[in-house]
Image: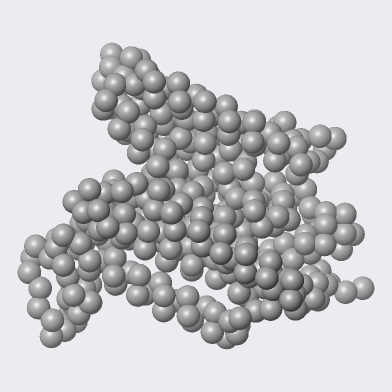
Amino acid sequence: MKSIGSIASETTADLATAAQRSVPDRWLLPGLGILLGAVILASLGIGAVPISPGQVLSILLAPLGIDLPWTFTDREAAVLFHIRAPRVAAGLLTGASLALGGVLMQALFRNPLAEPALIGVSSGAAMAAAALTVLGPLFLSQLGIPVTYLLPIVAFLGGWAVTAIVVRIAHCWGRIRVDHLLLAGIAMNAMAGAAIGVLMLIANDAQLREVAFWSFGSLGRADWTIIPILLVLTLPIFLFAKRYAPWFNALLLGEGEAALLGVPVEGLKRASILLTCIAIGGAVAFTGLIGFVGLVVPHVIRLISGPDHRRLVPASALLGAALLPLADLLSRTVAAPIELPIGLVTALLGAPFFLYLLLREQRREGT
């Protein structure tokens, strides 16, 4: 009897012939790595205080005792280390989390249009943050607890709570019904959106701006204290998705067929939902709602490299890690000194490009 890995590999090889990969496998990850490096250099150097690529390298290597010929001032070093570098690091980890969550959800639903928000984690986190922002001062003022310190924790717990409700509703006869999961997620997302709308109606101006932060997303509050947390939340979903990529390949055949091949389908679904909730809940807790990354990134990689999750997982993580800092760079420079919400930038970039990819795929299928 063939192993799961060999059967899954044969399955994805058959599907890859229909994908008509335009990028050779040997160039995919190196190319994305070069793109990521270029985005990091640009994000660290471009802004109100311009820093050349050479100066960026000099500043980064100076603590290691490596002196490069490009000189820099203390002001430029402070801007890079204390303002831009935390934003870039948060963008890398958040973008990778969103992309990996998209990979798992698209595999789980066997639909390239699925994204992490379908299970309610994003809307639940945003609703909890909005509720604490608007209603929290009424209850916490007597205790002397600043609302700001509790926001990430409450947002994370809100995402968990809504996801738990969605999973419980979808749980039927000892297994998670994917179709019920989708319908329950849509219903809970609608309820969370309505709750956020009500909270915005009763909020004052300061609270309204805070709720808008969670509704549209931003990396403006990133600092070095949140980077280890984001790393701890992102690393498990990457290791899990990479380790069990053959199982996700087998899942492309269908749940019944994957189970016959020995894949623990229910355990795989539960673990995928749990790790997606952890990663996306943490990202939303610190950056707010950022759409389209989890939807577009895996689909783009799938179109250019095929559906094999052994390539899809690392490539999506790299592209997601590059896309979000790039969107953040545009959000703070296009309309400077005004900073645009990063969620609007990702939607403006992602929606037209996604439509273009769909139309191109339709033309390929018609030829």
> In the visual, does 185 lie left or right of 329?
right
Residue 277 in sight from this viewpoint: yes
Say how many tags the image has.
0
Which percent across, then down, holds residue 366? 74, 71
Residue 132 in sight from this viewpoint: no
Which percent across, then down, holds residue 263? 81, 59
Applied colour scheme: one colour
Position above or below: 340 against 125: below
Q: Relative to the observer, which residue lies in front, 297 or 122?
A: 297
Which percent across, then down, holds residue 270? 70, 46
State the residue at coordinates (59%, 66%).
357
Q: Relative to the observer, which residue lies in front, 303 or 243?
A: 303
Which percent across, then down, holds residue 335? 25, 53
Position above or below: 89 against 361: above
Residue 286, quarter of the rendered image: top left
> In the visual, does 150 lie left or right of 260?
left
Q: Relative to the observer, which residue lies in front, 81 or 337?
A: 337
Q: Residue furthest right?
A: 1
Position above or below: 144 against 37: above
Position above or below: 23 against 225: below
Quadrant of the rendering where the C terminus is positioned = bottom right
State the residue at coordinates (33%, 69%).
40
State the residue at coordinates (26%, 49%).
339
State the residue at coordinates (75%, 37%).
180
Quadrant of the rendering where the N terminus is positioned = bottom right
Q: Relative to the observer, which residue lies in front, 187 or 251?
A: 187
